[in-house]
């Protein structure tokens, strides 16, 4: 969803951005980002200043305002009017790092051990396991049942852009189809498989 502020003229946005910076009192970008994360009052102030433009999602507008400030911080502090550098909406993957403790039951299978009966197999296997002659982890993990978990810490490990700007994509040109027609049938089947896999990935987004 795009911000309603994308259509607001630079002259109006400059006043909004400078008021936010002046009220925050921050001296650099790092402080501004930190305060935005921690200060709900700043979040409410941005929302109150932008909702008059018909916002449908306050966080989209906070995202847009924050990006504008980051991209234009130096010139905003100068006090002079200028043409704003504007951000484009993009898609990103967010990778969370979660440190946790799990309470679970694992099932490890050892194949092909020879015994004369199931009863003796139980007894001898326990003996070997207890004296260290048979380690469970030398088998194959076949199942795992998590009973409970305790989360110690959650942090964002990485955010990476996954595609170009979210705009209407141009249709394939006639030249592109002519290029495809020059490929062999085997190549076309490979291209078809690649495209199908890409479509499946996009549908999951």
Image (spheres, rainbow, N blue to C red):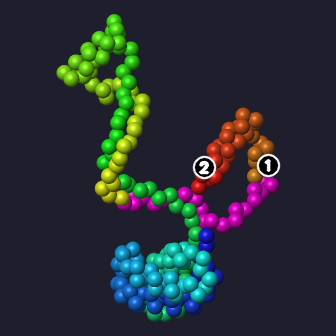
Q: Is residue 1 above or below residue 128?
A: below
Nearest the eye: 196 or 137: 137
Q: Please tell me which of labels 2 and 1 falls first in the chain.
A: 1
Q: Identify the secondary structure beneath mark 2.
A: helix
CA distance for labels 2 and 1: 27 Å
Using the rendered view, name the quadrant where residue 157 is placed: bottom left
**Which span is picked out in magenta?**
155-175
Question: What's the residue at 63%, 44% (across, down)?
Answer: 197
Q: What label does residue 201 carry, if any?
A: 2
Q: Identify the secondary structure beneath mark 1.
A: helix
Question: What's the residue at 46%, 86% (across, down)?
Answer: 45
Q: Position of residue 83 (x, y in %)?
A: 56, 86
Q: Position of residue 180 (x, y in %)?
A: 76, 45
Q: Position of residue 70 (x, y in %)?
A: 45, 77
Question: What's the residue at 25%, 20% (across, down)?
Answer: 126
Q: Is residue 86 above or below residue 129?
A: below
Image quadrant occupied by the N terminus: bottom right
Residue 27 vs residue 6: left or right? left
Nearest the eye: 2 or 162: 2
- Inspect the magenta stretch and tell me whether residue 162 lies in it: yes
Q: Position of residue 16 (x, y in %)?
A: 51, 89
Using the rendered view, name the quadrant where residue 167 is placed: bottom right
């Amino acid at each position: 969803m795009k911000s309603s502020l994308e259509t607001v003229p630079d002259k109006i946005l400059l006043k909004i951005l400078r008021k936010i910076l002046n009220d925050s009192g921050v001296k650099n970008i790092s402080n501004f980002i930190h305060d935005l994360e921690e200060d709900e009052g700043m979040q409410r102030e941005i929302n109150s200043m932008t909702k008059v433009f018909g916002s449908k999602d306050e966080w989209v507008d906070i995202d847009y305002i924050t990006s504008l400030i980051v991209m234009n911080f130096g010139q905003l502090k100068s006090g002079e009017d200028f043409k704003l550098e504007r951000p484009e909406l993009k898609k990103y993957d967010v990778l969370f790092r979660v440190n946790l403790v799990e309470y679970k039951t694992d099932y490890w299978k050892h194949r092909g051990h020879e015994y004369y009966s199931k009863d003796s197999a139980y007894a001898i296997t326990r003996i070997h396991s207890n004296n260290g002659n048979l380690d469970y982890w030398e088998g194959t993990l076949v199942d795992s049942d998590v009973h409970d978990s305790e989360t110690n810490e959650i942090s964002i490990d990485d955010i990476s852009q996954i595609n170009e700007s979210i705009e209407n994509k141009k249709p394939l040109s006639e030249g592109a189809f002519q290029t495809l027609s020059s490929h062999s049938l085997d190549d076309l089947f490979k291209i078809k498989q690649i495209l199908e896999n890409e479509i499946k990935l996009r549908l999951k987004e």
